[in-house]
Amino acid sequence: MTKSTSSSPDSFSDVVLAIHGGAQVLRRDVMSGEVEQRYLFHLAAALETGFKVLQKGGSAVDGVESAVRYLEDCPVFNSGKGAVLNINGHVELDAAIMDGRTKAAGSVACIRTVKNPISAARAVMEKSEHVLLAGPGADEFAQECGLEIVDAEYFHTDHQQQKLQEFQKAQQQAPQAFAAQSLPVLSKYGTVGAVALDKDHNLAAATSTGGIINKLRGRIGDSPLIGAGTYADNETCAVSATGHGEFFIRWVAAYDISAMMKYAGLDVVVAADKVINEKLKQVNGSGGVIALDAHGTCALPFNSEGMFRGCVTSNGDIRVFIFRN
C-alpha cells in the first residue's frame, strides 16, 4: 500500500526543511548499496546546507535556494550539472521559486548557461517585473544580474550521454513502447526541490530540473510553472513536485494541494496524498511531492517505486529515504 511519510509537530516548529531528488522507477533490488549510500549522503548534505541557513535566521526563500543549489551542483541528480540530455544531446534547465509570505514567484525555463538555475529563478522574482523567463533571454538576464555563467558543456556528464544513447537505441528497437503515455515507464524523473518553514513562520518552495531524457527541444515541464510543480502560500502550504510533468501541469497538482487545504479544510498530509495517490495515480501520472504547512507538518507522498527525499526539523534530526521503508 502506498503511504505518505509525514512529520507533525504539536506546535509551530522553529524551522523545518524538506527536500526531494526526484521520483523514479528503479527497484531497490537493482540498486547497489554503494549507490544507495551515495544518494543518501548527498540528500543529507543538502538538508544540512539549507538547515544551517534557516538556523542562522535566514528566510525560507534563502533556505530552499541553498538546499537546491547544493543539489544542482551534485551530478548524481537531474538538475544543473548532470542533468539529462534532450533529443539533440543538449541540456535545457528549468527552475522556480516562490515566497509563501508575499506569493512572489520567479522561474526560468530552457536555460543553458546559468550554473545555478534556482538562483536565476530567484533573480526573476526579485529583480524583474515578470514571473517566467525562458531561453536565451533568461540566460542573458541572469548574466546581467551577475550570476555565474558557465559553458553549456559544464552540465554534461558521461553518464547522461550514455543514458541518452541507450534510450535512443531502445526507442529505435521498440518504438511502440515509446508512445507518449508509455515514455515515463522507461525513464527516471529527476527533478530536485525543497520546501522550508523559517523562524518567522514563513513558507517557501523551490524546484529545479533537467526535465525528461530525450525530450523535444524547448519542452517545458511542470517545475517552472507556478501552481503545477511549485507553489507556496503561508495560509496553506509549500509544495515542490517531481514526476511526469505533463500530468502535474494538467492537474495543477501543487496548487490543488493548497486549494484542498484552503477550501475543503484538509490537512497537508491528506491533501497531498489525495493528489498523488488518487487523482494522479488514476490517470497514470507517476511521481510525488514534498509539502509543508505553516505548523511544520511535512508530507512526502509518491506513487512511483521510490522517491529521493528527506526532512530535518528544528531539533536537527535529519531523515533521508529512497524507497518506501
Image (cartoon, rainbow, N blue to C red):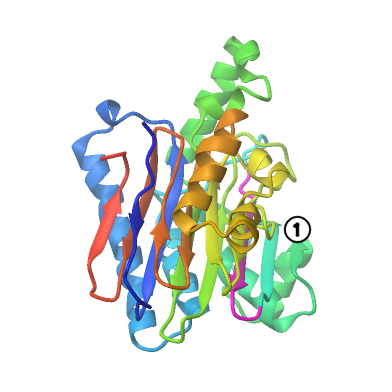
Q: Using the rendered view, name the quadrant where residue 223 is placed.
A: bottom right
Q: Nearer the viewer, residue 26 or 320?
A: 320
Left or right of residue 41: residue 111 = right
Q: Compared with residue 27, is residue 276 higher up or lower down, i.e. above or below?
A: below
Q: Position of residue 78 (x, y in %)?
A: 49, 48
- Which residue is at the far left? 33
Residue 64 sits inside the magenta stretch:
no
Q: Compared with residue 168, is residue 104 higher up or lower down, i.e. above or below?
A: below
Left or right of residue 169: residue 30 = left
Q: Position of residue 100 (x, y in %)?
A: 59, 74
Residue under the image location 33 percent in, 83 percent down: 55
- Which residue is at the far front? 265
Element at label 1 = helix
**Image quarter in which the C terminus is found:** top left
Residue 3 in view of the camera:
yes
Q: Compared with residue 44, is residue 16 higher up or lower down, i.e. above or below?
A: below
Q: Which residue is mark 1?
A: 135
Write down the region rendered in magenta. 90-102
Residue 94 sits inside the magenta stretch:
yes
**Image quarter in which the N terminus is found:** top left
